[in-house]
Amino acid sequence: MERLNVGLDDRSYQILITPEGFEGFAEELCRIGFPRQIALVTNVTVGPLYGEIIAPLLQRHGFSVRMVTIEDGEIYKNSETLDSIYTQLIETGCDRHSGLIALGGGVVGDMAGYAAATYLRGIPFVQVPTTVLAQVDSSVGGKTAINHPLGKNLIGAFYQPKSVFINIASLDTLDRRNVLAGMAEVVKYGVMFDRDFFCWLENNVTSLLELDRSKLAHAIRRSCEIKADVVARDEKESSVRAVLNYGHTFGHAVEQLSGYGKVLHGEAVAIGMVVAARISHFLGECSLEDVERISRLLRSFGLCVDPPEFSLEEYLIAMSRDKKVQSGVLKFILNVGIGDNKIVSIDEPGKILSAVLSRGLPCQICSE
Ligand code: NAD
Ligand code: GLY
């Protein structure tokens, strides 16, 4: 079992990474003094797979566990589902001395985290991420949210978990499409912060696609190290944390315009990263070869990088709702070569976007 620290003063916590199983999870909850009464929030897919392993394991260690189950999918990441979590918490008698476990991918993690942040003005929670995306990104850093019909993750809070427990073997049951989508966020860390890691990914695509446990462990550990470092430096995203949103401004627009759930978050981010790389090249911050390498690596992970065919105006309206818009000016994250980054203000995004948007074939995933 490996441990990484997320250094946030009195809100510091550890990320535990284990190749196999949930052994050590109950001990970890005891170590951090987690409440004995627990609401285990999961969804209809992950609950039967892992909730039914974790609940008895915790009960054997003297925890009382109540299951809170929600529907599965990004389309349920909304106020109605959040309300159903509150209802189940109230009905099962969760009080201020209860704790919450978020078991699942980023959708469960974000929503359960927001429920923990707001239920009775906040109860402690831990993250048990079970997708690649959640293990390398969403479970770390305390961003919790639900979607609004007008934009993704617009309602939420910064609320740190007390611990993150990553069981890599839980990825064995994850479908291929979601494994690939999660790799987009892994590539993001290399492009933004670590050229060597990017090169390592280029050289290890096949093993990663075969879910080689030790290669996955390296990719997850390095991603979490980078994320933990960024979060420790800028918890509330007033500076460097914004860089983690590389590819997300355009990606969120793709997700919203396609209808939540149609294009997976990681798939949309892959499209957005290549658009961002093209903008970076357009503005002289990286070479065409860098753009091609980023695009090639994402494609080698089976990800489509062609933007779906929405009009420039639709993209611009969707992007104008980005959380990085300040007084009407869009902040855009650029790669500087590969391994470094820069945040720029773009006051006329329409001009740049129309210059860089692909005139190629529409994305196969989105146009089905
Ligand atoms: P997801 O949570 O929808 O999970 C994908 C699918 O895999 C779901 O059907 C889920 O039930 C299933 N699943 C999960 N674990 C499984 C397992 N081990 N075996 C079998 N099936 C499993 O999607 P995701 O990609 O994990 O998360 C996407 C969400 O994360 C988006 O809503 C995005 O906005 C959010 N996100 C948040 C942050 C953050 O910092 N909070 C960062 C990135 C993304
Ligand atoms: N995934 C972006 C962040 O956590 O800041």
Image (cartoon, rainbow, N blue to C red):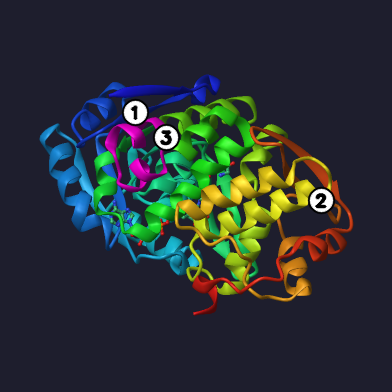
Secondary element under disc 2, as helix, strand or loop, is helix
Residue at the bottom extreme, as displayed: 368
Helix, strand or loop under label 3: helix
Q: Circles 2 and 1: CB distance less than 8 Å?
A: no
Badge 3 crowding class, 10 Å Cα cut-off, few under 14, some 14 to 19, many 20 or more, is many
Residue 192 is left or right of residue 267, and the answer is right
Per the rendering, the mark at residue 117 is: none
Q: Quadrant of ligand 2?
A: top right
Which residue is denoted by mark 2 in the rendering? 282
- The foreground one among 129 and 211 is 211
Picture coordinates of residue 275 (x, y %)? 69, 56
Amino acid on which disc 2 is placed? Phe
Q: Is residue 146 above or below residue 99?
A: below
Task: Quickly name the residue at label 1.
Answer: 16
Q: Which secondary structure is most common in the magenta stretch? A: helix
Label 1: which secondary element: strand
Label 2 or label 3, whichever lies nearer to me, is 2
Q: Name the residue under label 3.
A: 219
Front in this rendered view, residue 23 or 207: 207
Q: In which quarter of the image is residue 18?
A: top left
**Three-letter residue code for mark 1:** Leu
Which span is picked out in magenta?
A: 204-218
Judge by depth and name the residue closer to the eye, 180 or 316: 180
